[in-house]
Amino acid sequence: MKQSLFNSLFLKACRGERVPRPPVWLMRQAGRYLPQYRAIRAGVDFLTLCKTPELASRVSLQPVDILGVDAAVIFSDILVLLEAMGLHIHFAKDHGPRIEHPLRSVSDIRRLHPPDIAKDLRYVGEAIRLTSDTLRPRNIPVIGFAGAPFTLACYAIEGETSREFNKTKRFMNEDPKNFALLLAKLADGIALHLQGQIEAGASAVQIFDTWGGILSREDYLLFALPALQRAIDGVRRLGAPVILYVNGSTPHLEAMAETGADVLSVDWRLPLSEVRRRVGRKVALQGNLDPTVLYSNPRVIRQRTRAMFADHPGPGLIANLGHGILPDIPVAHAKAFVKAVQTVQM
Ligand code: CP3
């Protein structure tokens, strides 16, 4: 990695070093709230967009140019790994993802195979290479990502998005041994996927545990935590910071701090000062404006963003939302958030 990129605002903050202001990016920043994204997406379906490196890279660069964020996130999806491990995924119009023949039995779990990254996920690496080549002269890092073992298990077992993921929790309770086996298999796939992204030029990686919040603390410790540790152990030696996002993080903060992640990305439910008290100083924090605050006007957005930092002045702070940006947020409001962070003094 070039020295200047190593010393970029974003990577310094990930390492907990002192910076003049917090870096800022938005989860799901490459997406539907941008007219420029919708224009490209109008001509191509979602998975084809993910699998066409030149287009995926263009979409990843859009928020850097339009919002002026301090990091790019690669345009892809957490479910492409499941495809590379043998499941059939598709994105139906207006329905979100669907998996044909979801996992329901031990023999289904045996069908899952390790991903061949160089072959079946080659397009992710190529998109990262193109994007990081473009951004390196500007010292802007590219973030790679994957789903967490538990969140991927939710989709693999349920076959579609759900509110309660009862089929997943049924499997977990009926057959805990094989559920743990599934999570371990997914963890190994996640480690390979993240390694491939770092080798292709991602300077940091984020693990999305979108559904970790539906687990009791006991089950998070029993199932989700060991699998996360296994995945993170598999990438740490490469030296790129690992960010762990959990939606519904409140009960799980102490466990998240034990995963080996360098940065905890938290939802909006607690003030950052309280999160900091609970996890101590060994991790950086990323967050955590409620994404719906971006529906308010730019004046309120500025106030609420500044209040976030007044409460926790850093170091080791990365500004983001508490979950992904919603598709109907005005671009001007996303810009107001980015601008508000960039004028904070620490
Ligand atoms: O952050 C970014 O800008 C990079 C791209 C990105 C996408 N998905 C593109 C996408 C990232 C980081 C993801 C992660 C992802 N994918 C998660 C975890 C993040 C989170 O919000 O908690 C999850 C749960 C998925 C699975 C997934 N993909 C769902 C449930 C859906 C349908 C719901 C939705 O948001 O539309 C998708 C589709 C998807 N992934 C879209 C995009 C831009 C919309 C596809 C379109 O253009 O029609």
Image: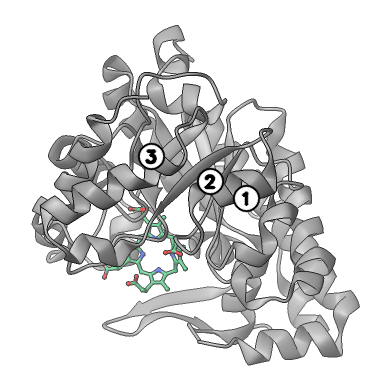
Residue type, mark 3 in image: Ala
Residue 284 found in image quarter: top right
**Which residue corresponds to mark 3?**
310
> Above or below — where is 202 with respect to 180?
above
**Alpha carbon of mark 1 to alpha carbon of mark 2: how far?**
42 Å
Category of crowding for the residue at label 1, using alpha-carbon neighbours closer than 10 angstroms: few (below 14), some (14–19), many (at least 20): some
Q: Is residue 178 left or right of residue 92?
A: right
**Alpha carbon of mark 3 to alpha carbon of mark 2: how far?**
9 Å
Ligand 1 resides in the quarter of the picture at: bottom left
Task: Residue 273: give x, y in percent of width and height.
Answer: 53, 46
Q: Which comes sooner in the sequence, label 3 or label 2?
A: 2
**Which residue corresponds to mark 2?**
273
Question: Camera-side residue: 241 or 344?
Answer: 344
**Which residue corresponds to mark 1?**
116
Q: Secondary structure at mark 2?
A: helix
Q: Which comes sooner in the sequence, label 1 or label 3?
A: 1
Q: Which comes sooner in the sequence, label 1 or label 2?
A: 1
Ligand 1 within 8 Å, label 2 CB? no
Q: Residue at position x 11%, y 59% from top? A: 297
Residue 15 found in image quarter: top right
Residue type, mark 2 in image: Ser
- Return the residue found at the far right: 177
Question: Camera-side residue: 78 or 13?
Answer: 13
> Above or below — where is 179 with respect to 272?
below
Task: Residue 230: give x, y in percent of width and height.
Answer: 78, 49
